[in-house]
Amino acid sequence: MNSSLYGAGAEYALHALLILASRPEPASVKDLATFQKVPERFLAKLFTRLRKAGLVAGREGVTGGFALARPADRITVMEVLAAVDPDRRLFACAEIRANCALFGAQAPEWATAGTCRIHAVMLEAEQVLQDFLGSRTLADLGCEFERKAPGAFLADTRAWFVSRKRARTHAT
């Protein structure tokens, strides 16, 4: 079984925010979900969390949607992950160090005093990961993507969102 520290929510949110970072106008959750072929309801829940975290701002109405609440170079990957997957930890120590068969009913003080060494190493690793993810911004990811993607794809993406918005405004 494949398992990851961060799930689909983190991936959906980061991809959707990268789209917003490349657009001058807001985009609806429906359009973002349709464009990425991801579940709209799930993405809407993620955007509720992103809004509460101050990462996106919503605009009401037919031409509304979401936009980044601040520039992409001021939103870190770690902020996004913390918003969509709060309280995610690299390791959960079960304190099994007190369970040795040689200890009987009560583990000696030396065995359980202080932080478990395994837990301490995992906490240090988690901090390194958080520091790294805190050093990367949406703008960093966007620049990397723009270098990779053909210009025609970027133009087609912009045109797709414009046509979706135009269709909504003409439908009212």
Image (spheres, rainbow, N blue to C red):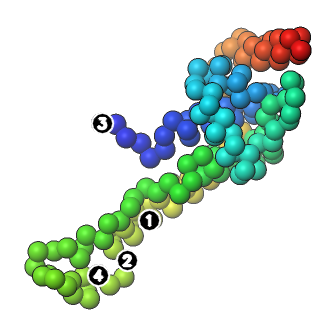
The answer to which of marks 3 and 2 sits earlier in the sequence is 3
Cα gap from disc 4 to disc 3, whole angstroms = 33 Å
Report if the CB atoms under discs 1 and 2 are less than 8 Å apart: yes
Q: Looking at the picture, which amino acid does disc 2 mark?
A: Thr
| Residues packed near mark 2 inside 10 Å, few (<14), some (14 to 19) or many (20 plus) | few
Q: Secondary structure at mark 1?
A: helix
Cα gap from disc 3 to disc 1, whole angstroms = 25 Å
Q: Position of residue 143 (x, y in %)?
A: 69, 32
Q: Residue 130's image quarter?
A: bottom right
Q: Looking at the picture, which amino acid does disc 3 mark?
A: Met
Cα gap from disc 1 to disc 4, whole angstroms = 17 Å
Instruction: Tell me the quarter of the image containing the N terminus.
Output: top left
Q: Where does label 3 land, which residue?
A: 1
Q: Where does label 2 land, which residue?
A: 115
Q: Which mark is residue 25?
A: none
Q: Where does label 4 land, which residue?
A: 112
Does residue 57 sit above or below 128 in this rendering? above
Report if the CB atoms under discs 1 and 4 are less than 8 Å apart: no
Q: Is 60 in front, or is 74?
A: 60
Instruction: Tell me what residue is drawn at x 68 percent, y 14 percent.
Output: 153
Q: Residue furthest bottom?
A: 109
Report if the CB atoms under discs 3 and 1 are less than 8 Å apart: no
The answer to which of marks 1 and 4 sits earlier in the sequence is 4
The answer to which of marks 3 and 1 sits earlier in the sequence is 3
Q: Position of residue 92 (x, y in %)?
A: 38, 61
Cα gap from disc 3 to disc 2, whole angstroms = 31 Å
Q: Position of residue 29 (x, y in %)?
A: 71, 29
Report if the CB atoms under discs 4 and 3 are less than 8 Å apart: no
**Res 166 seen here:** no
Report if the CB atoms under discs 4 and 2 are less than 8 Å apart: no
